Image (cartoon, grey):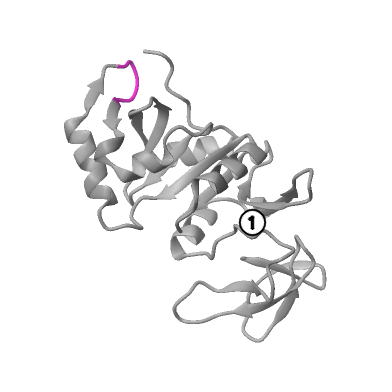
Amino acid sequence: MRFALIDSVRCEANPGHAGVCPHCGSVVIAKCGSIKVGHWAHKSRRNCDSLWEPETPWHRSWKDVFPIEWQEHGRRDPIGELHIADVLTPQELALEFQHSPIKRDEVEVRTNFHGNICWIVDGLRLENSLKQFSHALDVGYRIRSRGAPIFQRYHSDSLLLKKWSGLNAPIVFDFGGEDLWIIGRSDINSSYVYPLRRPLLVREFKRGNRPPPIQNM
C-alpha cells in the first residue's frame, strides 16, 4: 500500500513511522528497504482487501502516470468485502495493474464488482511470455482493418493469452515497449489483439475511456 493516514493526511511510507489504513482503519507500519518499493504493511489483512498484491517498481511506474488523488481507492461490495482499485478515475474507470499470479475466479470477482474496469498485465513477469506471444503473432492471422492492425492469435501458442482471454473487460499486456497489446475480442480458441501506443492509451485512461473492443469483422 502506497498511502496511509498520519493525522488524517495521506502520506507515503517513511522509515520508523506508523499510520492508519484509509480503507479499513487498521494500524500499518512503514516498510522501507533497499529491495522492495517503500510501502505500508498491515499487521493483519483480515479486515482489508485480501487480494491486494505487494507493489513492484512496475506497479509504481504505472501509478505515477496518474494523479495521486486517483490512486488506491477502496469500495465495499454488498456483503462488506473491500476492493481497492489501483487507480480510479473521476469517471469511475478502475485500473488494475497485475504483476503477481492471480486466480481466474479472483479476477472475475474484481471485474464483476468494478464493472467499468481495465486490467493492465505485466507481460515480462514470466521469462517465456514475450517469446510465446511473439510466436503467436508469427503463426496467427492478420485481419484487415481501417485502423490499427488486428491479429488473430491462438491460445495454444501463448499461455498469457489463454489465461486472460474471455473476460468481460479489456486486457492490456505491457511488454515494456511503447506498443501495448490489447485483447479486443475472444473466441473459444483464439483472441483478437491489436497494438496501441502507450501515450495514446494513457490519454484515454485519463479521459475515463477503456480501449475500444473489436467489433464483428
In magenta, the rendered stretch is 145-150
Residue at x-position 54% and y-position 65%: 54
Question: What is the crowding at mark 1: few (fewer than 14 residues within 10 Å), some, or many (at least 20)?
Answer: few
Q: Position of residue 28 (x, y in %)?
A: 70, 75
Magenta run includes residue 111: no
Relative side of 21 to 175, left or right:
right
Report helix, strand or loop for mark 1: helix
Residue 41 vs residue 61, the one in the foreground: 41
Picture coordinates of residue 75 (x, y %)?
A: 74, 49
Q: Position of residue 128 (x, y in %)?
A: 25, 53
Q: Which residue is mark 1?
A: 68
The quarter of the displayed image where residue 95 is located: top right
Q: Amino acid at mark 1?
A: Ile
| Residue 72 percent across, percent down from the top left | 65, 55
Residue 122 shown left or right of residue 145 in the figure: right
Give the position of the C terminus as an image quadrant: top left
Left or right placement of residue 180 versus residue 55 in this view: left
Closer-to-camera residue (163/35): 163
Q: Is residue 54 above or below residue 93?
A: below
